[in-house]
Image (cartoon, rainbow, N blue to C red):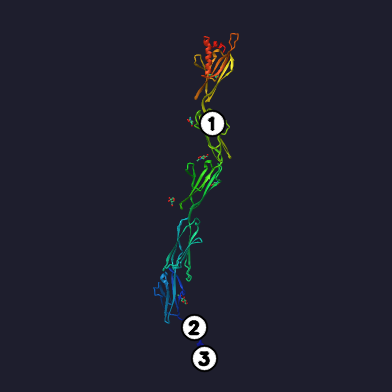
Amino acid sequence: MFKAMGRASHAVLLILCVLRTVKAFEMEIIPAERIVAQIGGTLILTCNTTGCASPSFSWRTQMDSPLGGKVSNHRTYSTLTMNPVGIANSHSYLCTVICERGKKEKSVKVELYSFPSDPIIEISPSLVAGEPAPVICRIPDVYPSHHLEVLLKKDEHVLHEKDFSDDDSTNTETKIVKYTFHPVAEDAGKEITCVARLPIADMDFEPKERTSSQKLDVNFGPQNTVITASPGNSPMEGDSLNLTCVTQSNPPAQIVWSKYLAEESIQHLIKNNVLFIPRVHFNDSGRYICEVINLVTNKTEEATVDIIIQGAPVITKLTIEPSTTVQEGENVSIQCSAESNPPPKIILRRKSDNADIGTSSARSILLPSVMFQNGGDYECVAENKYGTSKSEITLNVKYGPKNTMITVFPAALKEGETVTMKCTSSGNPAPVISWKKKKATGESEKISKNATITIQNLKNQDLGLYECEAYNQFGKEEKAVELFVQARLEEPDQMIPLIIAFSSVAAVAVPAVAILIYVSRQAKINGSYSLVKALRLKV
Ligand SMILES: *[C@@H]1O[C@H](CO)[C@@H](O)[C@H](O)[C@H]1NC(C)=O
Ligand SMILES: *[C@@H]1O[C@H](CO)[C@@H](O)[C@H](O)[C@H]1NC(C)=O
Ligand SMILES: *[C@@H]1O[C@H](CO)[C@@H](O)[C@H](O)[C@H]1NC(C)=O
Ligand SMILES: *[C@@H]1O[C@H](CO)[C@@H](O)[C@H](O)[C@H]1NC(C)=O
Ligand SMILES: *[C@@H]1O[C@H](CO)[C@@H](O)[C@H](O)[C@H]1NC(C)=O
Ligand SMILES: *[C@@H]1O[C@H](CO)[C@@H](O)[C@H](O)[C@H]1NC(C)=O
């Protein structure tokens, strides 16, 4: 029985012991460990009790500074809410609980940090290569800033590093890192990165590193401007030609094509990177300029190319100065020029001649005081390895009558026979020929407007001086012929056959006059002026 009792009381004791253990007065602060709070965030400290029916709570800081939070008491626990957490919350907080069974207290240290947002990069949206580019990286509201480390990188390359270990800010502050670099053309498209780190090893918060990046827009150029000519710098006449101007520039450059003209002036062609000439001519040879302008960097660059059009010659000029129709004595110049590349061999000559007169380009023939013999067709031949080109021009030299000549047929004849006298003359325009006969009185009488006169049944009275006149607007020329008795045939019959001859004389020529005088004197000796009697004399 006692044995049983003893066992039972043992059990009761055990139960009592268990009850006493469960109901023991305890307290804790949640969270219990070191508290790392972000400034600006919310932090709730809970002071929890067990084993106390109606605890009374009190919160204070170890330095007895203001709590910087709101206390809210519940039956078994109390909360201290810090919203937002501020720099004033950096303390050890002490929670004291008083229960009927006693008093307990615990403290917890609140540590603060602030690293709320990514860095902000400030950099000009359009940089110019070679010019200083300031970069600003702002790290907003950092705390504690003496831990802050900032890196500025261009892609993977570190441009600049800064640590703030000497910084003694006591509150959150926006930290600024400034750096100036000189971008190059190759930097276009690369990224500038600002890496901010707050590496506090024994504080547990994330993230401890924040980064921001910005793509670089680097304006550069124009530079390395080159021209390509397709199919080449020496296309054949008639080919198409593309001149392409390539430059490196951001933003793309404005391109203006122009060409140097002979007079040092410049001809503006097009605003396009390709200058297309569908059919080139020799006059398209020359120096072309591609001028490129980057309106942002405000730089210009120029490239030039010399184009030589090749091909068979083209005669560009064949002229006679002062005119194709001139008068004898004028100063005449005949000029021929042709273009081609390679340069043509030019031959300018009178067609009827065969001698080369000139052998280089822009040839001319000078005919000072031109003569009628210089008239005629002139030919210009231009030739190079690609071909030959020919052109003709006629020089018409006007001149007065020349080389006026009388021919008599037959050369000697007898009285009663027929004689033909023909007068020819050159001149331009062709001279008009007329015949006159000198009468005994000395006057001349027009006898024919034909170049040829025929006297049939020649008689004594037909003897005498015949004058031929050749005339055009540039002058006149006269020639004369005398029909006279050269010999007398002494025949017994009454007829006196005469051998008549002629003598070509100038219209006023002395020999003709002499003969006339002789004939007249013989006539006078015989006391009469009968030509027939005179002719009877032996000459
Ligand atoms: C207090 O502690 C008890 C026991 O550990 C737990 O059940 C209760 O949820 C806690 N109260 C608060 C407000 O944390
Ligand atoms: C020039 O360019 C045009 C188009 O722009 C093309 O049709 C032509 O074939 C090119 N000519 C040459 C010689 O490159
Ligand atoms: C170049 O030559 C071509 C053909 O000979 C001609 O049509 C064109 O007018 C010339 N251009 C100039 C600028 O002289
Ligand atoms: C560009 O350069 C020219 C001369 O070099 C100057 O007159 C002009 O003001 C500049 N323009 C800009 C936008 O910089
Ligand atoms: C021809 O040229 C010569 C010398 O150059 C000059 O003396 C003469 O007057 C010129 N004649 C004419 C008709 O122009
Ligand atoms: C000139 O001669 C031709 C024949 O030779 C003749 O027909 C013509 O009538 C003559 N004229 C004169 C004016 O005598």
Q: Residue at point 44% right, 72% down?
A: 110
Three-letter code, disc 1: Thr
How far from the left and from the top, in percent, is residue 306? 52, 45
Of marks 1 and 3, which one's residue comes earlier in the chain? 3
Discs 3/2, front: 2
How many other residues sit within 10 Å of disc 3, few (<14), some (14-19) or many (≥20)? few
Q: Is residue 223 above or below residue 450?
A: below
Q: Is residue 400 above or below residue 521?
A: below
Three-letter code, disc 3: Phe
How far from the left and from the top, in percent, is residue 503? 56, 18
Q: Are marks 1 and 3 in contact (CB under 8 Å)?
A: no
- On screen, residue 174 versus residue 304, left or right, reads left
Q: Nearer the viewer, residue 440 or 423?
A: 440
The circle on residue 394 is: 1
Q: Is mark 1 within 8 Å of ligand 5?
A: no
Residue hosting label 3: 2
Q: Is residue 31 above or below residue 502?
A: below
Judged from the image, the secondary structure of the residue bearing numbered disc 2 is helix
Residue 502 shows up from this direction: yes
Judged from the image, the secondary structure of the residue bearing numbered disc 1 is strand
Residue 55 shows up from this direction: no
Of marks 1 and 2, which one's residue comes earlier in the chain? 2
The circle on residue 19 is: none
The circle on residue 18 is: 2
Q: Nearer the viewer, residue 372 or 449?
A: 372
